Image (cartoon, rainbow, N blue to C red):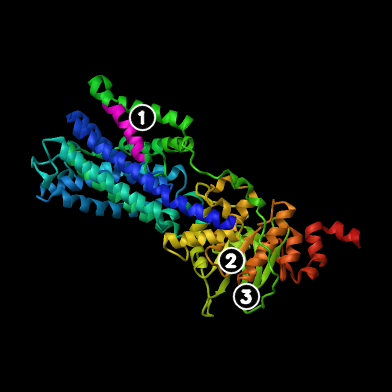
């Protein structure tokens, strides 16, 4: 058995055994959480566990948006309040809360999409501030529509006892319902994270532009996540309203509640499946026991407890409790990942594919930002089986051209057409359109999904052609070994050197099975040995039938790789032809070295 085969076998075995062991341990912990309060039989202890289940479920639902998708929503109590009001209003009309929770979930999902679609255009703290503003809007609306919501007086549930109405004299039935709802939210969160949607969400959170280049509709996947999160939050809100027996606008549309929901995930482990549950298990008993023991003297003490714990976590456990335990339990991160550049390249038999028809045609591309004219009348073509070099001094507009050739910038004028598989010329618009017709690209500044492993990074590209996780994983492994990254499949991308990251980005694009590959300075910053290896890798990619446009400053690579070279200077094409001819062109020499050099040479 070869080392490569052995490594693949061990990786496969590791990934098929560990999840089952973790799942078994997790199941035992969950079962213990249910059994302990039932065995103790104390009503106050049962109340604490009901509260743990409710807030763990709310935080797990929030984590789908705030953790997986990276959208820090501080207005999530909107959906909790919608579910609470839907349950009680319909209960007053004689409709069981079991149906009311689904009505509330549907309304919350629609409201979430309507709110989030414009808010997703905001970045950083502005998105969080927008969600807080919408939360206040809903609180004011609940105060205004008194006939429906009871206004500031609030609503009390009708005294109807039994499973049909979710109202009980004993805590045990409520404990079972809360536990069941926690299981549902955990199952939904696990399903999302372990399928293509979850990979897309994390990729969008880490590097949105790289995700778009991989064909991810970043807005769509976020909207799906927020709709699922809102629906789950509303369902739990309905039950919690029945459990509390009374609600008012200030309590359900509460910023404090929203912050608490987010805090459990932050403290437990943001973006993990079990983090929110661990955060709730850790914090809820502290605050509830303090209030139970101190009574009125502890008014507001839970806020102090949460704040103090959050400060300690941020200072000493930035990745949450899960991150800390993973570190000490020796989670595999494969330290060899930092040496990824040293893998020997696979010997390549030199071949020369036949140059075919035009595959990409860009005509008269102009791009200006206000009064700044970045490109002027740039026209170029890429043929099947060809490597086209795009060179020019810094600031010449090369990356701007790349952005127009991949949909990240819309030309001010001019067109980009791609020949489809059936031979028709298409005019894609968005990065997703370009990815769909077979255009893949890398970035001048590498954009790995740092929180993902090497394998998961490449899987994001593989998902473009393979929706099934197993198929995408197989493609990712095959691509990784072809790119010299096989031994580091389990290494986190952030542990790779610059050469390894550049190769990882090429691997992610190649997993998409592109027909056109746009390479933006993939050899910048790497040593001479790796330049030779990168040249062999690019030629081997071309030999598989992929046409390449490469921006490059390493002239050795340009001369070795390119069939033709286009030279850009000040946003205009000043020369085009074979590499040997272009480098002797006086205009090209002048653009790179200046007029004084040309005159001195003369």
Judge whether residue 37 is colored magenta.
no
Write down the residue under mark 3. 384
Q: Residue at x 25, y 51 (%)?
A: 105
Question: Mark number for residue 405?
Answer: 2
For numbered disc 3, what is the local secondary structure? loop
Q: Nearer the viewer, residue 228 or 20?
A: 20
Q: Residue at x 18, y 40 (%)?
A: 174
Looking at the image, residue 45 lies above or below residue 453: above
Of callouts 1 and 3, the N-terminal one = 1
Judge whether residue 281 is colored magenta.
yes
Where residue 471 appears, as percent x and y from the top left, is 45, 63
Of callouts 3 and 2, the N-terminal one = 3
Write down the residue under mark 1. 306
Of callouts 2 and 1, the N-terminal one = 1
Where residue 449 appears, as percent x and y from the top left, is 52, 50
Crowding at mark 2 (Cα within 10 Å: few <14, some 14-19, many 20+): many
**Region of the chain picked out in magenta, as a range:** 276-288
Looking at the image, residue 445 lies above or below residue 513: above
Q: Are marks 2 and 1 in contact (CB under 8 Å)?
A: no
Q: Nearer the viewer, residue 285 or 403?
A: 285
- Tell me which secondary structure the magenta stretch mostly adopts: helix
Looking at the image, residue 20 lies above or below residue 321: below
Per the model, the C-alpha gap separating discs 3 and 2 is: 16 Å
Per the model, the C-alpha gap separating discs 1 and 3 is: 61 Å
For numbered disc 2, what is the local secondary structure? helix
């Amino acid at each position: 058995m070869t080392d490569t085969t052995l490594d693949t076998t061990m990786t496969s075995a590791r990934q098929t055994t560990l999840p089952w062991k973790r799942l078994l341990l997790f199941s035992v912990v969950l079962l213990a959480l249910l059994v302990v309060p039932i065995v103790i039989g104390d009503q106050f202890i049962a109340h604490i566990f009901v509260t743990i289940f409710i807030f763990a479920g709310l935080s797990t639902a929030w984590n789908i948006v705030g953790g997986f998708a990276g959208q820090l929503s501080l207005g999530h109590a909107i959906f909790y309040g919608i579910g609470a009001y839907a349950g009680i209003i319909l209960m007053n009309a004689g409709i069981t809360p079991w149906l009311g929770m689904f009505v509330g979930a549907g309304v919350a999902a629609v409201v979430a999409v309507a709110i989030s679609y414009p808010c997703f255009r905001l970045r950083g703290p502005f998105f969080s501030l927008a969600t807080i503003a919408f939360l206040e809007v809903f609180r004011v609306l609940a105060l205004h529509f008194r006939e429906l919501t009871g206004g500031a007086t609030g609503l009390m549930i009708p005294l109807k006892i039994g499973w049909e109405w979710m109202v009980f004299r004993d805590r045990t039935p409520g404990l079972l319902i809360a536990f069941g709802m926690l299981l549902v939210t955990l199952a939904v969160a696990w399903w999302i994270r372990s399928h293509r949607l979850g990979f897309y969400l994390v990729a969008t959170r880490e590097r949105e532009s790289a995700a778009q280049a991989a064909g991810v509709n970043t807005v769509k996947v976020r909207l799906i996540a927020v709709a699922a999160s809102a629906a789950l939050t509303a369902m739990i809100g309905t039950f919690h309203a029945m459990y509390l027996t009374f609600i008012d606008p200030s309590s359900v549309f509460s910023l404090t509640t929203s912050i608490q929901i987010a805090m459990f995930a932050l403290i437990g482990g943001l973006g993990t499946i079990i983090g929110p549950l661990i955060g709730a298990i850790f914090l809820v008993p502290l605050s509830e026991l303090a209030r139970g023991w101190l009574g009125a003297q502890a008014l507001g003490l839970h806020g102090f407890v949460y704040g103090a714990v959050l400060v300690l976590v941020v200072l000493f456990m930035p990745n949450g409790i899960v991150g800390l335990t993973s570190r000490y339990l020796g989670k595999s991160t494969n330290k060899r990942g930092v040496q990824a550049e040293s893998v020997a390249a696979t010997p390549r038999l030199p071949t020369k594919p036949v140059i075919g028809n035009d595959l990409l045609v860009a005509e008269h591309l102009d791009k200006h930002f206000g009064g700044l004219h970045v490109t002027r009348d740039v026209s170029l073509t890429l043929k099947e089986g060809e490597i086209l070099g795009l060179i020019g001094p810094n600031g010449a507009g090369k990356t701007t051209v790349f952005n127009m050739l991949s949909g990240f910038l819309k030309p001010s004028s001019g067109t980009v057409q791609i020949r489809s598989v059936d031979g028709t010329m298409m005019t894609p618009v968005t990065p997703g359109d370009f990815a769909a017709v077979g255009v893949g690209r890398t970035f001048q500044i590498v954009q790995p999904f740092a929180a993902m492993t090497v394998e998961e990074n490449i899987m994001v590209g593989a998902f473009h052609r393979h929706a099934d996780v197993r198929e995408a994983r197989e493609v990712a492994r095959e691509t990784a070994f072809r790119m010299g990254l096989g031994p580091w499949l389990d290494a986190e991308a952030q542990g790779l050197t610059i050469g390894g990251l550049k190769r990882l980005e090429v691997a992610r694009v190649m997993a998409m099975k592109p027909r056109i590959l746009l390479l933006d300075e993939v050899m910048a910053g790497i040593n001479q040995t790796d330049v030779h290896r990168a040249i062999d890798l690019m030629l081997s990619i071309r030999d598989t039938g992929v046409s390449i446009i490469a921006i490059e400053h390493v002239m050795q690579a340009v001369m070795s790789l390119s069939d033709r070279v286009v030279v850009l200077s000040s946003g205009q094409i000043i020369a085009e032809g074979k590499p040997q001819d272009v480098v002797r062109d006086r205009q090209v020499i002048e653009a790179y070295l200046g007029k004084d050099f040309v005159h001195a040479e003369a």
